[in-house]
Image: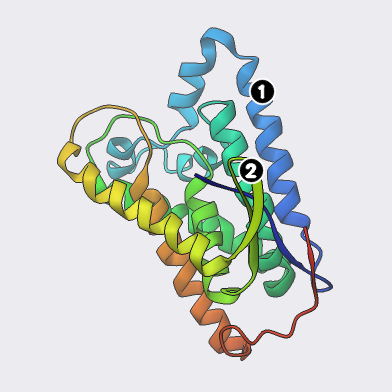
Amino acid sequence: MLFPIGDDNIKGGHRPIFSYSLILINVVIFGYEMQLGGGLNAFVRTYGAIPAEVMQGEDLFTLLTSTFLHGGIMHLLGNMLFLWIFADNIEAVVGNMRFFAFYLLGGLVAHAAHIAYDPSSIVPTVGASGAIAAVMGAYLVMFPRSRVRVLFLIFPFHIPAFIFLGLWIYFQLESGIGSLQMRGEQIGGVAYWAHIGGFVFGVLYGFYYRAARSMPPFGKQRLDHEIG
């Protein structure tokens, strides 16, 4: 298993205010969740997005609030690691407010994909992974040859972003297609179609931004960078 631990960070550009603030907000909210004890389930059902209820036009605010909730410490740490690695380069290039709007919209698109997969589900959906998948999709298009530093067992090495992210979305697609036979069963698990929907949205945004801002051809960015 390849475990990401860093990437080529852009020097200059916009400071990653929202990238790091989102990590802090998610951690603080998770800390609050852990203080709820027996009230946690009720909290998650109130602020998590339940597809069947959203389809009825109920509790639409949960499409945003659920993006800041997590189901456990490993869920949180995994999401925050990917957000820390991939978000700052996107924000540095597109700007602070534009990045924040993109992140929230990516989360909404991810929810739409998950709800389309199983609109009758009564299982609350929580987690930032759909929005983070959008960030990863944009990163694939905007920085395909950026180096991602990964660990294999205990050995660190670098691979191009397009390989790492290509493998990631391949496994999401494989799992998402496999989950189609379980559609309609009211069980918990990974919302693969939220990941896929968010990633596709991010890819489209990446192409839009490249065209609108006339970024250099793929692999020919001349941005100064440092390993982070």
Query: Between tags 1 and 2, which lies in front?
Result: 2
Give the SS element for disc 1: helix
Toward the viewer: 105 or 188?
188
User: Foreground: 186 or 42?
Assistant: 186
The span from disc 1 to disc 2 (Cα, nearest Å) is: 17 Å
Tell me which corner region of the image, top left, top right, bottom left or bottom right, holds residue 218: bottom right
Say which amino acid is labelled 1: Tyr
Q: Which residue is mark 1?
A: 32
At a point 77% along the width and 57% down the height, the residue shown is 228
Residue in the foreground of this view, choosing between 1 and 43: 1
Would residue 189 appear left or right of 163 to someone viewing this image?
left
- Is residue 109 visible in this depiction of the protein? no
Q: Residue at x 58, y 10 (%)?
A: 37
The answer to whether 141 is drawn above or below residue 183 in the figure is below
Question: Extreme left residue here?
Answer: 181
Q: Residue at x 75, y 50 (%)?
A: 20
10 Å crowding of disc 2: few (<14), some (14-19), many (20+): many
Q: Give the left or right position of residue 131, taking residue 148 as reference.
A: left
Observer able to see residue 191: yes
Question: Can you give x and y, in whole percent of width and height, for residue 122 in the image?
Answer: 29, 30
- Give the mark nearer the N terminus: 1 vs 2: 1
Tell me which residue sits at (78%, 56%) in the image. Answer: 17
Q: Is residue 188 left or right of residue 214?
A: left
Position of residue 43 measured from the top left corner of the image (x, y, whole percent): 51, 22
Badges 1 and 2: C-beta atoms under 8 Å apart? no
Q: What residue occupies the far right of the structure in this picture?
A: 12
Does 47 sit left or right of 27 as displayed? Answer: left
Residue 63, given in percent of the width and then of the height, sits at: 46, 44
Q: What SS does tag 2 mark? A: helix
Query: According to the image, label 2 marks what residue?
Result: 80
Colouring of the image: rainbow
Q: Amino acid at mark 2?
A: Met
